[in-house]
Each structure stands twice: as C-alpha cells, then as structure tokens.
Image (tube, rainbow, N blue to C red):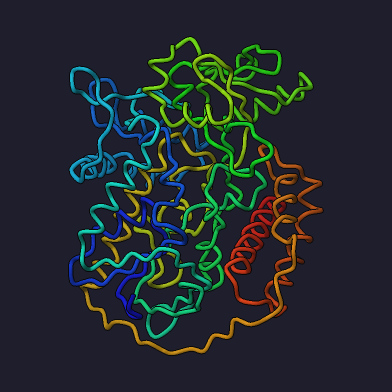
Amino acid sequence: METRYDVLIVGSGVAGLYASLFFGGDTRVLMLAKRARTVSSSSLAQGGIAAVLDHEDDSFDMHIADTLIAGGYKNNVAAVEALVREGPEDVRKIMELGVEFDRNPDGSLNRTLEGGHSRRRIYHHRDQTGKEIVDKLLAEVSKRKNICLEDNAQIISVVPSGGGFRADLFVNGAVASVFAGFCLMATGGIGRVYMYTTNPPTATGDGIRFAYEIGAKIKNLHFIQFHPTAFDSPDNPERFLISEAVRGEGAYLLNGYKERFMHRYDDRLELAPRDVVSRSILLESRRTGSNRFYLDITRRGRDYLFNRFPAISAACLERGVDIAADLIPVYPCQHYLMGGVDVDLNGRTTVPRLYAAGECAHTGVHGGNRLASNSLLEALVFGRRAALDIAGCIRAGYAGVEEIPVSIDPSGAPLSPGLTQTIREIMQRAYFVMPDEAAIRQGRPRVESILSRLENERFALTPEFSEAKSLAVVAAIILREAEEK
C-alpha cells in the first residue's frame, strides 16, 4: 500500500466495489475493508435485488409507486426516479460481470415477491444474492491494476488535508496515514449501536462519524428500519435474518398461540411493508401478552425449501430448527438505516470532494422505510453515479493531493469497560420499532455524556476506541433527532 492516491473508498460492500469499476486505469484507487473484504452487510443480503427488467406485467411507475408507499411518501422523488429507471441497466451490467440469478426451467429469470411489492420483480441467487454480487464484483476488482484493496484496515479519522483528505488508520497493529484527492464513504450501516441487529460487526457507523466530524450534513439518522423476521435468539447480538422472500414464497406469520394475526393490522397481511409488520408484531405481543412469534412455511415441502433457501435452511438447522417441519422463531430487530450522510443525486456531500454511497448515505430514496430489495439496487445506482461524478472532476483538472506528514501518538488510558454496552442498552430501550419518548429523554443526556468523555479525555487510540466513538456519535444524533422531531 502506497501513501498517495486519487480516490479513497472506505468500505468493500456493493456500493464501494461497483463504484471502483468506473475509474479509468490511470486513476489510483485505494479501497479499505475494515475486516476481511467479504465482511459487509452486502454479503449478508439474502432476498435479492428489485428491478423492472420485463415490462410485460410490470412498469417503472409501479416500482416507483411501491417505493413511495413503503417510504411513507417521505422519499426524494428524483432519487426514486433515478433508482428505478437507471437500475435495470446496472443489473444487466453486473450480469455481464458474471452475476448469476436463479432461472426457471425455460431459462427465463425467476422473480420472487417481497413485502410492499405489487409485482414479482425480485431477482435472486437462491438466498445468497448479496454474496453472489460481492464475490463477482471482487473478482472484477482483482483484475484492475489501478485498484488497491486492503483488508483489515480500520480508519481512525478522515480530515481535510493538502487539497484532499488524510485518512489515519490501523494496519497490522500500527497507525499509518494515506492521502487522497477524493473520498467516497461506503461504510454501511449502524446496526451495532443496538443490542440486536442483522448487521455484521463492522456496522458501527464509522463513515457517518467521519463525515460529521468534518462538517458534512447528516440527515434523518432516526429513519431506522427494524426487520420483522430475524431468527429469535436472545443470547446472540447478531441475529440471523429470515429473508422477506420466505414470506414472499408463502410463509405465514404466527403469534404465540400459533395463530395468524396480520389480518388485524393490515390488509396486505404478511406482505405488508417491514415497518408495518414490525409494529404489528409489537401490538400483537401487547394484545396476547406473549413475545413469541413464528414463521410457518412447512407447507412448501422439503425439496423446494432446501433448494430455494439453502443458507437459511442450514443456519436454522444449526440452531435446531428444520424449516420443512418446524416453526421458525422470529422477532424484530435492527436491520437497515435510511438516513445518513446527506448527499445529492451524484453522491456529493456538503464537504467538497467528500462523497457517500450505500447505506451510510442519505439519498432520500427510501423515505421513512425501505422497500424490500431496493438496497442493493441503491448501492449500484448511486455508487456508479458518485464514481462518474468524481471521475468527471478528475478529468476536468485535478492537481492531486499534497502529503502533509503528521505525528500520531496512540498512547492514552484504556477504554472504560461497558461504554458501548451502555449505549446499546439505551438505544434498545429508547428507540426500537415504536420509540419510547420517556426513555429518549432519559437516554439522550447519558449518551451525550459518554460522547463528551470520548472526545475530551485522553484514551488510547485503538480500534475499540474508534468504534466506541462512532457508536456514541451515531446514538447521540439519533436521539437528538428523535426528541426534536
């Protein structure tokens, strides 16, 4: 790894990987993966990618309408138009790069249905669509000599420097600095600010914190999606997701008495949007006095289920549940962030040369609630848009970035135990599915006090400290927005 690049991409999910492919061979690109390059929310995406490739029984207008309805009409309509109308070409592009989607016996692409969609428009690779896309994009990135992808490179901070940015990071246990003229944040979500999440350990909101610290506008961070059907395992903070596609293929949602109940809350039943189903589960829990809920898809048969959902079937078996014979215990948990670093349609933030794409960015495309399987599409469309905008800026005249050496002293006091756990407990109690106003008012000053300590006391510069600071910044912004809205 060198020290000077044209473009720094922070994150190795679909948004960052796809963006990197739109730079010419003379543009030096550094991509940093916080852990292994395959560890991202993108890789965990099960259901599929939504797009209108066939207009015979679907249309752009229908996809747009479904996205707006799911988002509570809080969406940026221009962003939704870009997503839906441009997305199909990006889907075709990744297919040209080798991504394989499931097909019907006649060779046509198979489409599934998920909550909030009025048509079958979800293209999938069994129940590992994200992994399939990430693997094929990584294979393409490895062919590009202008792209350097570094694993286990955790950033401490990103600051303006020398006409671009300086990023300080941990590499092989030591602190190093790299410089780049442009920076694209593609760091994913904020799931680890909660006790329970479907997100990987890397999802600590780092990119949002870095952007916030250098003055970028953060918008609608309280727009958080809670997935209604995560595997219910209270002893594990990382909840395994039971894809919405399982309900799309006919699973029933049952209460603690093994009864269907969605008819009490929404005419769309199990295929209502995620926020509706999550709220319905909590309301049903209050009605029945039980917090036990299940998915039942046993009627579809073993051969079908183990072929269509091999990863879900295997993961459930590891937990003692045979989805062809048993009910699957589920409960809502944190899943996705619709807010983030505020950007325009080309990924530009309010800080010059700083861009954001993917889950850490607020394009406004999702409104108050993301429509199922629009996330991978958003990563493609707006990752590409950001990269093309940066590339255009470079072509228009770019003087490079000056290296300004800095001395970083990582010494300091050890991080106080329990700080991140306290943040997670506060967030789980105050802002889960249906916010608790009293808990928000009580929790906000506690989180802000923790953040003040992290900012003002001299703690040792470690990966754990950096993540704790990110979680504190994210939690403080969420609770402030929640209290002031």
> Residue 363, how many percent across, how many down?
44, 52
* Residue drawn where x is 68% and y is 81% of the image: 412
Q: Is residue 1 left or right of residue 55?
A: right
Q: Is residue 276 above or below residue 463?
A: above
> Residue 377, how many percent across, how many down?
35, 42
Q: Is residue 271 left or right of residue 52?
A: right
Q: Nearer the viewer, residue 382 or 235?
A: 235
> Residue 154, how many percent across, how many down?
49, 67
**Picture quarter with the N terminus:** bottom left
* Residue drawn where x is 45% and y is 67% of the image: 153
Q: Is residue 139 above or below residue 215?
A: above
Q: Nearer the viewer, residue 368 or 300?
A: 300
Q: Is residue 191 left or right of residue 371?
A: right
Q: Is residue 284 left or right of residue 41?
A: right
Q: Nearer the viewer, residue 357 or 328?
A: 328
**How many labels were placed on the picture?**
0
> Residue 451, how many percent across, how many down?
70, 67
Q: Is residue 210 above or below residue 94?
A: below
* Residue drawn where x is 43% and y is 11% of the image: 301
